[in-house]
Image: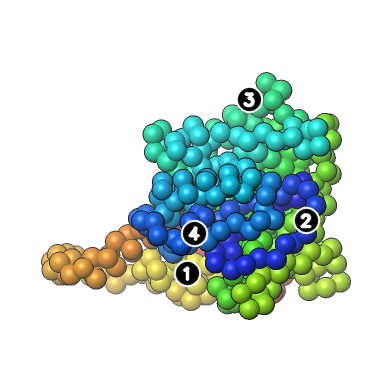
Amino acid sequence: MILVGDFVPQSLSVADPGFRGRVLCNLEAPVLGDGKYPKSVKSGPHIFNSALPEFCRGWVFTLANNHMMDYGASGLGATKAALAECGAQSCGAGANLAEARFPLIIDEGGVRVAIIACCEPQFGDAQTDVAGVAVAGGWVVSEIIRLRRENLCEHVVVSCHAGLEFSPWPSPEIRELYRSYIDAGASIVHGHHAHIPQGYEKYKRGFIAYGLGNFVADPSDWSWLKWSSLSLGLEVDFSPSTFNVTPFTLTFTREQERLHVIKSKINAETDIGRYFDGCCAPFDDSRLMLAVWQEAAIRTYGHLYAERLKLPGGGANIYRIRPLLRVCVEVLNSLSMVLLRRPLFRRRMVESMLYQKNAIRNWSHAAAIDEAISVGVGLRSDIRSTQSRLLADYMMSF
């Protein structure tokens, strides 16, 4: 089996990457043809894929992510129909909560492999009688234990769409979460969402890939982000009692309207090898691991959250944080009541509120904001170092 990251070609044609064997990847957006479906209410862009390439026949797609419900239940239904037509299987989203959480069990060379798909909370959560995606929670551990206890499979793969976007490293909370899946009996954790590759490690009897990156995406959408055209792949050989994982790299390029994916070995002597060493080395040094997480959180706070959330500390330097000036709440409330009668202002107000909701509710967003502010005001020690700064300068875009 080959595990890869986020698959979102949108309207571009994709050349056959030539994989041998079954492929597991995250289908980052619904498959909608011309896209004429009603958009759901959410923060961020609405995206969709026009069609699935023919070479995806027999693949397994996880659907639990922050874009699968961009076009609501009708978009999910269209995606399920497109997958069936392509002969592909899926898990992680459904017409209700039970269906979204239901694991997929496949036969991999005579070995039963169960796949559980889930994601961090954002938009489009499945509910008891509402279509949506499976949000990670205590049920994942319970399901791993049940699958193993009832001898329904030899291996469990947990595919989770989570982690701080644009960060080469996971938060301490995500690392603890993914390790808990291995502790419960999973063999592999298949992480994705950050749009650039994150590190990977062997943990006890399992293997964790914290983020595989963009497997297929339009390079023009990500030209501003370093390493966005690089991703990690895993070749996994299962036997009834054990498994073997071989990591490799994938790079994609666009030639006119066609995407080409190139597979290669990880060469420690190249820039790509240096990147992956920077992703993985902190796992063996707990202090460096926290230092690089602080780098990622503080830089992301200054680059993204401070301005959008109207918080102090915009820019990369957390020490710019200053107390907010006191304002007259009554005057602002009165002004808002007048402006809310204007459709443009009302739409922007809703967009701002939805962004705030996402920043509060999503685990990785909230963890980054908490870390940045806690370090900035002295609630936590700042342990960033020259080494962590050099790593972040090389590996991050801000």
Q: Of the residues under marks 2 and 1, which one precedes in the sequence?
A: 2
Tell whether 332 sits left or right of 388: left
Task: For marks 2 and 1, give the CA distance.
Answer: 37 Å
Point out the frontmost of discs 2 and 4: 4
Q: Residue at x 80, y 68 (%)?
A: 273
**Mark 3 surroundings within 10 Å by alpha-carbon count, few (fewer than 14), some (14 through 19), many (20 or more):** some
Judged from the image, the secondary structure of the residue bearing numbered disc 2 is loop
Alpha carbon distance from label 3 to label 4: 38 Å
CA separation, marks 3 and 1? 40 Å
Q: Three-letter amino acid code at disc 2?
A: Phe
Label whose residue precedes the other's in the sequence (4 or 1): 4
In the displayed structure, would residue 66 be above or below residue 344?
A: above
Q: Amino acid at mark 4?
A: Gly
Whether residue 262 sits left or right of residue 27 in the image: it is right
Q: CA distance from mark 3 to mark 2?
A: 32 Å
- Please give the residue where the numbered disc 3 appears in the rendered image: 146
Residue on which disc 4 sits: 33
**Picture quarter with the C terminus:** bottom right
Q: Residue at x 69, y 46 (%)?
A: 58
Q: Is residue 291 left or right of residue 344?
A: right
Q: CA distance from mark 2 to mark 4?
A: 25 Å
**Circles 3 and 4: CB atoms closer than 8 Å:** no
Q: Which label was assigned to residue 159?
A: none
Q: Nearer the viewer, mark 3 or mark 1?
A: 3
Residue 321 seen from this side = no
Q: Are marks 3 and 1 in contact (CB under 8 Å)?
A: no
Residue 246 shows up from this direction: yes
Q: Residue at x 74, y 38 (%)?
A: 187
User: Which label sits in the foreground, 3 or 4?
Assistant: 4
Q: Dot 1: what SS?
A: helix
Q: Is residue 184 above or below residue 372?
A: above
